[in-house]
Image: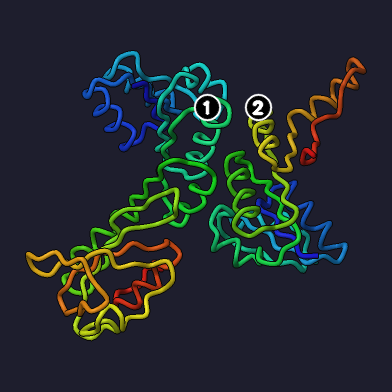
Amino acid sequence: MYIIVVGGGKVGYYLTKTLLNEGHEVLLIERNPEKASTFAERFGAVVVAGDGAEAATLAAAGAARADVVIAVTGEDEDNLVVCQSARQKFHVGRTIARVNNPKNEQLFRLLGIDVTVSQTNYILNLIEQSIPERSFLHLLSLRHADLAIIEAKVGEDTPVTNRTISQVQLPVDCVIAAIARGPELIVPTPATQILRGDDIIALTHREQEDELRRLLGCFVVS
Amino acid sequence: MKVVVMGCGRVGARIASILDHNGHDVAVVDTDARAFRRLPNDFRGNTVIGTGIDEDVLRSAGIEGASAFVAVTNGDNRNIMAAQVARLMFQVPEVICRIYDPVREDTYRRLGLTTVCPTTTISAIILDHVIGAGDLSGVRGREA
């Protein structure tokens, strides 16, 4: 696969290194010429100095035949323009953008970026996961349908504790797909009772995620 | 009408003060508080410190209910992103975006943004004086 990485910060550096080791054809574009030449000494001729948001740079990098363009600079606006330009001008099949402000993930998806990676959101998820009770874990975002799969641990006094599925008024576009209770995995029926300590796995529309958090007694971010 | 101007450089400050002078409700956004010194002393509009690519900053500048949004910071990419936020997330009816890079300007004009490219415009004016063959196509509207 031919992969273009834009932005030679720590993320871009290790990404390039790893992808090269995996045998991919990689090109790293870094704006700062000094940084670019340092990287070139380490990686060889797979580094170019230039502004990845400029069409001429992408054209010279052979973006038209790239399978993936990954924009991982520290600026959301630069990552957005790199990916949009790759798609619009060079018809790159897959664009991946690093998002620094987690709120921008929605916008980037609306604007056609295939994958967004938000370190802030990952760290938030890890923190939530490490809180023993009432954790609410965002497992997976499904871009096209704007759906998310979440996991939540049921606390002692939430609105759903000790109620059956039929008694729980879920937000619209939410469904409880499974309940993990100790070693048991339960596919719930309307009569299934939700107990403290249950891990609920639910499929939800992203817009309802916060409402679902409240219902399950989890804290709401932002 | 309510207008949010992002970037309080020479152009942003001038647009904001003229709009204010004409009785419009103006908010100016800039990351640097010192930039607001460019505004006249009698400026009655609102000044907001922050980056216009942040929805929360735009919200506090009153983007909800604004009739127009003008993106004139020094960064092409910042202007492009803010313009798309204003259009998509806040449905601002009139969004104008300055893009210095003519290639990028062309790309985003095709994507439906109203763009102004000073590079093309100023070159055309100067060329017109020098060889009388300029073409003033730097200011373009949304394509039909």
Residue under label 1: A91
- The chain identifier of the residue carrying mark 2 reads B
**Crowding near pointer 2: few (<14 within 10 Å), some, many (20+)?**
some
Quarter-of-image position of residue A123: bottom left
Secondary structure state at the residue bearing disc 2: helix
Quarter-of-image position of residue B23: bottom right
| Nearest the eye: A119 or A178 | A178
Q: Residue at x 42, y 61 (%)?
A: A206
Q: Position of residue A212 (x, y in %)?
A: 36, 72
**B106 left or right, relative to A8:** right
Q: Position of residue A1 (x, y in %)?
A: 33, 22
The Cα–Cα distance between marks 2 and 1, rounded to whole angstroms, is: 16 Å
Q: Amino acid at mark 1?
A: His
Q: Residue at x 34, y 13 (%)?
A: A45
Numbered circles on residues, count? 2
Q: Amino acid at mark 2?
A: Val
Q: Position of residue A90 (x, y in %)?
A: 54, 24
Q: How is the image coloured?
A: rainbow
Residue under label 2: B103
Q: Position of residue B55 (x, y in %)?
A: 55, 59
**Crowding near pointer 1: few (<14 within 10 Å), some, many (20+)?**
some
Q: Quadrant of the C terminus of chain A?
A: bottom left
Mark in front: 2 vs 1: 1
- The chain identifier of the residue carrying mark 1 reads A
| Nearest the eye: B42 or B13 | B13
**A105 left or right, relative to B119:** left
Secondary structure state at the residue bearing disc 1: loop
